[in-house]
């Protein structure tokens, strides 16, 4: 099955207080860093943004689509990205604020998505991580437009749960304090 990544860049960033996509990150931006990481593992990349939102420069091959119904959360962004891709794709989904993802993690998660399951979902420290997971682009549960919670979506799926040895790859940056602390850290070689 062909692989793709959907990077969700349409959130309101209420806790951060500003758009996360363009925040500086180690000589680049948060969004560009995530796109670069997933690019090494997939055939296509779709960035879902709020309609008209300004994004930092991205490679020409990255497909940018506007969230069909903004303000309805990540399930809607996933739905928009999957509709754009069409059926038949194994899709790694992530948010723009996860700069610690690794290409190996993306590949491992996509490889766990088999014909017997609808989603391959990492579990770190006892919690499912739906925004660093692999889904089928034709996931039937996405047809329910009342779904707003990623965990409610998972509850309707046949899941393969993946134990994560290093939960730091799933670290996201939600607040100015989290972002500032992460910026001060030395990059891991």
Image (spheres, grey):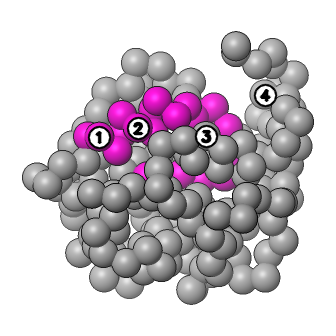
Tell me where residue 169 appears, x and y as whole percent: 55, 29
Label 3 neighbour load within 10 Å: few <14, some 14-19, many 20+: some
Residue 70 visible in this rendered orientation of the protein: yes
Residue 148's image quarter?
A: bottom left
**Answer yes or no: do the residues labelled 1 and 2 have beta carbons within 8 Å?**
yes
Q: Which residues are magenta?
A: 92-112
Residue at the spot of label 2: 107
- Checking the image for residue 182, the label placed there is 4
How far is mark 4 from mark 3, CA to CA? 17 Å
Circle nearer the N terminus (4, 1): 1
Judge whether residue 102 is colored magenta.
Answer: yes
Q: Which marked residue is nearer to the observer: mark 4 or mark 2?
A: 2
Q: Is residue 78 left or right of residue 38?
A: left
Q: Is residue 166 left or right of residue 90?
A: right
Label 1 neighbour load within 10 Å: few <14, some 14-19, many 20+: few
Which residue is depicted at the point 72% across and 42% down?
A: 33
């Amino acid at each position: 099955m062909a692989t793709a990544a959907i990077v969700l860049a349409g959130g309101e960033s209420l806790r951060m207080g500003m758009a996360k996509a363009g925040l500086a990150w180690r000589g680049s931006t948060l969004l560009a860093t995530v796109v670069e990481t997933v690019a090494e593992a997939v055939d296509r990349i779709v960035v879902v943004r709020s309609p008209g939102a300004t994004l930092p420069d991205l490679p020409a091959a990255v497909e940018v689509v506007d969230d069909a119904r903004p303000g309805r959360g990540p399930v809607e962004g996933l739905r928009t990205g999957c509709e754009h891709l069409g059926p038949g794709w194994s899709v790694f989904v992530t948010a723009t604020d996860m700069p610690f993802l690794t290409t190996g993690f993306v590949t491992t998660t996509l490889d766990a998505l088999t014909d017997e399951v609808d989603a391959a979902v990492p579990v770190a420290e006892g919690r499912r991580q739906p925004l660093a997971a692999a889904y089928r682009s034709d996931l039937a549960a996405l047809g329910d437009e009342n779904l707003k919670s990623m965990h409610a979506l998972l509850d309707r799926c046949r899941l393969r749960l993946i134990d994560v040895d290093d939960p730091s790859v799933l670290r996201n940056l939600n607040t100015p304090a989290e972002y500032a602390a992460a910026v001060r850290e030395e990059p891991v070689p």
